[in-house]
Image (tube, rainbow, N blue to C red):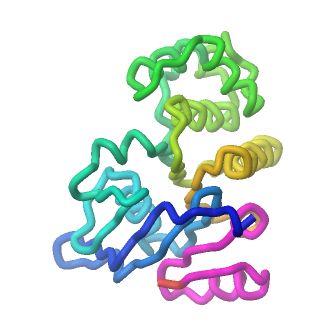
Amino acid sequence: MYGRRIQMLNVESVVKSFDEKKVLHDVSFTAEKGEIIGLVGENGAGKSTLLHILATLQKPSNGKITLDGQSYQHETKEIRKKIGFVPQDIAIWEEFTVEENMKFFEKLSWKDKSVTQLKQLCVDMELDKWKEPVHILSGGMKRKLNLAISLIHDPEVLFLDEPTVGIDLKSRSEIGAYLQNLADTQDTLIIYTSHDMDEITTLCDRVLCLGEDPFYQDLLTKSGQEMIVF
């Protein structure tokens, strides 16, 4: 699998500070197409901050990031066309049906999609409640819809902040299987945060560990997972 991969994302010496508090300390790594990378660490270690920087939602205090050779600093608009982001908080219209949500967000997307294509995207991730209002859906179904919306424009890179938190085991497994298939068949680069270490060690090719808490490092070492510590 690694033989066919091409370097896509390059993060060099990224630092992020809020006033006097430094949240990220000299983060550097590269990522390749088709990789699934887990991002772990204790609360406050900077996982969401790093993910938001990679998704162009925040700017680093220092450092350099490129995607396919394009600069985050100078080519932000072009980079955003290649990125999908799934926030931890579910960002969908509760009073709309699944269909209405997909149609609404398609209008805001970088790509035009037919209703048939939108519906198929939901079917592919086993979200079969096309005509149901969102407010009656299970947490797992809402998470799937959140993910489906982020994929409307066929992003090359997908960033997810706790995409399976608080949902049932079946939905968690289905989302994991869909992400694995996306990486394998579309060469999508996927980076996501999670506190579920079983999920991380099962799904991810390697792991970025933020912070000095030995708990995560010990678990990953015992699992044999490839790990980079910051």
Left or right, 145 with reference to 156: right
At horizontal 59% and vertical 22% (from top left) the residue drawn is: 135
Corner quadrant of residue 204: bottom right
The magenta stretch spans which residues?
Answer: 201-228
Among the 4 quarters of the image, the one containing residue 182: top right
Residue 187 rendering spot, x and y as whole percentages: 64, 50
Q: Position of residue 194 (x, y in %)?
A: 61, 61
Residue at image position (50%, 31%) is 153
Depth check: give the residue in front, 92 or 136.
Answer: 92
Residue toward you, 207 or 2: 2
The residue sitting at 49% across, 78% down in the picture is 210
Q: Residue furthest front?
A: 4
Number of numbered tags placed on the structure image: 0
Q: Is residue 208 magenta?
A: yes
Determine the residue positioned at 64% across, 63% down.
Answer: 5
In the image, residue 106 sits, relative to residue 26, either above or below, namely above
Above or below, 122 against 196 in this view is above
On the image, the x and y values in percent for residue 29 come to: 47, 76
Q: Residue furthest left?
A: 19
Percent position of residue 84, x then y: 48, 43
Is residue 111 rendered to the left or right of residue 99? left
User: In the rendered image of this protein, does residue 75 appear above or below residue 3?
Assistant: above
Task: Check residue 217 for magenta coloring.
Answer: yes
Quadrant containing the N terminus in the rendered view: bottom right
